[in-house]
Each structure stands twice: as structure tokens, then as C-alpha cells.
Image (cartoon, rainbow, N blue to C red):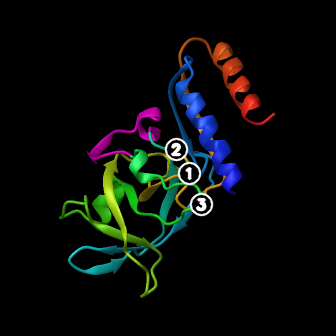
Amino acid sequence: QDETQRLIRRVDAELRAAPVTRNSAVARILLLTGGSWYNPMTIRTDRRFTTERDVQMNAVSPGFFATMRVPILAGRGFDERDSRPIGETGRRSVIVNQAFVNRYLASRNPLGVHIGIGALPGTQTDIQIVGVVGDVSYRGLREQSEEAWFPIFEGDDSMGTFYVRVRGTPEQAFQTIRQIVHQADP
């Protein structure tokens, strides 16, 4: 797992630095394929409550929302403060979508609210909301859902899908991207 994380981080850094790259990011779960990672959530405001249905989750690298052209509506996107060093686990920050805010936090400022993954009475609520983004088509184009986005590599994130916006022609970019991947892991 640590070796896979190192490889994904290396390819991500090299892609972002490549002249053919406009924006680049990594997501744990591939979008628009019907796949998902979901769980109910426990939310702690002035009271503690759980979501009545599952929240769609994903783990993404800094720059994901800019790469996918998803607007940050409040707070901030992820940055290097949010990714733990390889070998450390635990989630400490989250970005939620507008649908999540509308359904569960409509009457309050969502920034700084703490949540936890799960709905058991002992669920820890130590993950802080640091941003709100526009709604994303997660599993399919017609589906709307409440979403929570975590920094990639905080848990057992040993897989990822790269999203790259390129400069120039796709053919030129593909050649560079193949070379970066091949050099990282022939």
C-alpha cells in the first residue's frame, strides 16, 4: 500500500509539472461509472445527529476541483496541509457539496462543522468541513446526491484515477503522459 501511494504521488507530481499539463488531479473513485464509496455520516453542530441516508464519498488530490471545473462556493480546496505523510492514517478535513449543506446544514455556516463516517453512537466526529463545492455528477449524469470529499492518501487510498487537462493536442499529451508513467513504473 505505501509503495502504491508513493507511485501515485510521484506520477501526480510529474504530471502536474509537465509542460503539456494545464491541470491534473487524482481521485480514488472513478466518476460517472456507477461505482461508489458511501456511508451514513454523523454530524456535530450544537447537537449531534446522523444522516438518514448514505452520503457519497471520494478521496481527491489538491487541484481536483479546479481540474474538474467544480466551483468552490465557500472555504477552500485541499492543499498540502490536508495530506498526511505516507504511513499515517486518519481523516481530518472534508469538503462537502451544496446538496449536503442544503439537506443537513441549511440554517448554519458549514465551515468548521465536524462530521464522522458512520452512524453508530460511538462514531468520532473529528473531521472538519473546510470547504463547500458545487454539486458534481458522481455516479451518473442524472443522479444528485449529498457528497463528502476527503484528501486522498489519508486512509487506505492505494488506488487512483488521474484526471488531466492538457495543453496542445491530445496526441502530444498522451505521448508525454505515457513516458511519465513508464519512467515511474516500467
What residue is drawn where x is 32% and y is 42%? Answer: 72
Q: Nearer the viewer, residue 59 or 186?
A: 186
| Residue 64 pos. (x, y %) | 47, 40
Circle 3 — which element?
Answer: loop
Q: Is residue 112 above or below residue 49?
A: above
Which mark is nearer the camera, 2 or 1?
1
Q: Is residue 53 above or below residue 18?
A: below
Q: In this view of the protein, can residue 115 be seen by the observer? A: yes
Report whether 62 appears left or right of 163. left
> According to the image, label 2 marks what residue?
141
| Residue 86 pos. (x, y %) | 58, 55
> According to the image, label 3 marks what residue?
87
Q: Nearer the viewer, residue 130 or 170?
A: 130
Circle 1 — which element?
Answer: loop
Q: Is residue 47 above or below residue 82?
A: below
Cβ atoms under marks 3 and 2 closer than 8 Å: no
> According to the image, label 1 marks what residue?
139
| Residue 131 pos. (x, y %) | 31, 51
Q: Amino acid at mark 2?
A: Leu
Q: Is residue 165 above or below residue 73?
A: above
Q: Quadrant of the C terminus?
A: top right
Circle 2 — which element?
Answer: loop
Q: Amino acid at mark 3?
A: Gly
Range drawn in magenta: 63-77
CA gap, disc 3 and disc 2: 36 Å
CA gap, disc 2 and disc 1: 7 Å
What residue is drawn where x is 45% and y is 72%? Answer: 53
